[in-house]
């Protein structure tokens, strides 16, 4: 048990609320956006953002979207979707052309056959970037590799006032959640909301 006295707060003021976490920009990146776009073009316009659950792939993809030029088509496939291929195709909103960039979040939800069918439907796109849990399907553009140091930096960014109190417990929090930053944030959110005892 970790004895930490934190002031409970309303959901809107919680430093680990989802709307605050979404404000992150490029916290994984070791290179700039323009360098990544050049690398993507060097890979033939096909690339994957690879990493385990909760490692920031979606955040990274959204940030990359900010720097894309031209027509960008976005496809998001939820993990609970019973018909991921149909969901993906419906979100294309018309045929894919040579001027389109396609950003796919959750492409690992498509099985091998479904992925082949989907890829054939979008083959003409100038650029295709997808999130994946493991390398494959597309060349790796960037690997999201969370670490205790990254968690620490994020906590200091989100909650500079209490970060010193939380700091000693972050390595254990990171380890218990197997490096899933999202789950770490969820637990910290619950701590501030008074939904847990004084323990992680």
Image (tube, helix red, strand yellow):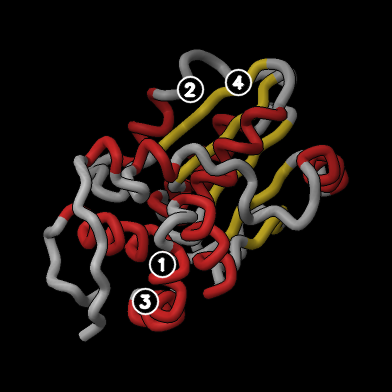
How far apart in space, not on screen, are marks 1 and 2 (Cα)? 30 Å
Which is nearer the N-term, disc 4 or disc 3? 4
Classify residue 65 by image quadrant: top right
| Contact check, label 1 and label 3, Cβ < 8 Å | no
Report which residue position mark 4 lands on. Answer: 96
Instruction: Tell which tag, 4 or 1, sits nearer the viewer.
Output: 1
Which residue is located at x 73 percent, y 21 percent?
Answer: 69
Is residue 183 in sight in this rendering?
A: yes
How far apart in space, not on screen, are marks 4 and 1 (Cα)? 34 Å
In the picture, the disc for residue 173 is 3
**Disc 3 residue crowd, few under 14, some 14–19, many 20+, Cα 10 Å:** many
Which is nearer the N-term, disc 4 or disc 1? 4
| Contact check, label 4 and label 2, Cβ < 8 Å | yes
- Looking at the image, the residue that sits furthest to the top is 94
How far apart in space, not on screen, are marks 1 and 3 (Cα)? 10 Å
Residue 33 placement (x, y as % from top left)? 77, 40
Q: Which quadrant is home to the C terminus?
A: bottom left
Which is nearer the N-term, disc 2 or disc 3? 2
Which residue is located at x 12 percent, y 59 percent?
Answer: 195
Which residue is located at x 29 percent, y 45 percent?
Answer: 14
Instruction: Tell which tag, 1 or 3, sits nearer the viewer.
Output: 3
Report which residue position mark 2 lands on. Answer: 92
- Name the foreground residue: 186 vs 164: 164
| Contact check, label 4 and label 3, Cβ < 8 Å | no
Q: Secondary structure at mark 2?
A: loop
How far apart in space, not on screen, are marks 2 and 3 (Cα)? 39 Å
Report which residue position mark 1 lands on. Answer: 180
**Disc 4 residue crowd, few under 14, some 14–19, many 20+, Cα 10 Å:** some
| Contact check, label 2 and label 3, Cβ < 8 Å | no
Residue 145 placement (x, y as % from top left)? 59, 67
Q: Which quadrant is home to the N terminus?
A: bottom left
């Amino acid at each position: 048990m970790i004895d930490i006295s934190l002031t409970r707060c309303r959901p809107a003021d919680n430093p680990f609320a989802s709307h605050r976490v979404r404000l992150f920009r490029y916290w994984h990146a070791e290179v700039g956006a323009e360098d990544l776009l050049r690398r993507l073009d060097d890979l033939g316009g096909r690339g994957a953002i690879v990493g385990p659950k909760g490692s920031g792939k979606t955040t990274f993809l959204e940030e990359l979207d900010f720097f894309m030029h031209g027509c960008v088509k976005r496809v998001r496939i939820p993990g609970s979707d019973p018909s991921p291929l149909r969901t993906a195709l419906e979100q294309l909103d018309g045929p894919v052309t040579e001027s389109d960039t396609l950003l796919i979040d959750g492409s690992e939800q498509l099985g091998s056959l479904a992925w082949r069918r989907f890829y054939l439907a979008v083959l003409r796109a100038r650029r295709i970037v997808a999130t994946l849990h493991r390398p494959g399907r597309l060349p790796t553009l960037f690997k999201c590799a969370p670490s205790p140091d990254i968690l620490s930096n994020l906590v200091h960014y989100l909650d500079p006032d209490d970060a010193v109190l939380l700091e000693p417990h972050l390595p254990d929090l990171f380890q218990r959640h197997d490096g899933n930053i999202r789950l770490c944030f969820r637990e910290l959110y619950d701590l501030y909301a008074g939904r847990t005892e004084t323990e992680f």
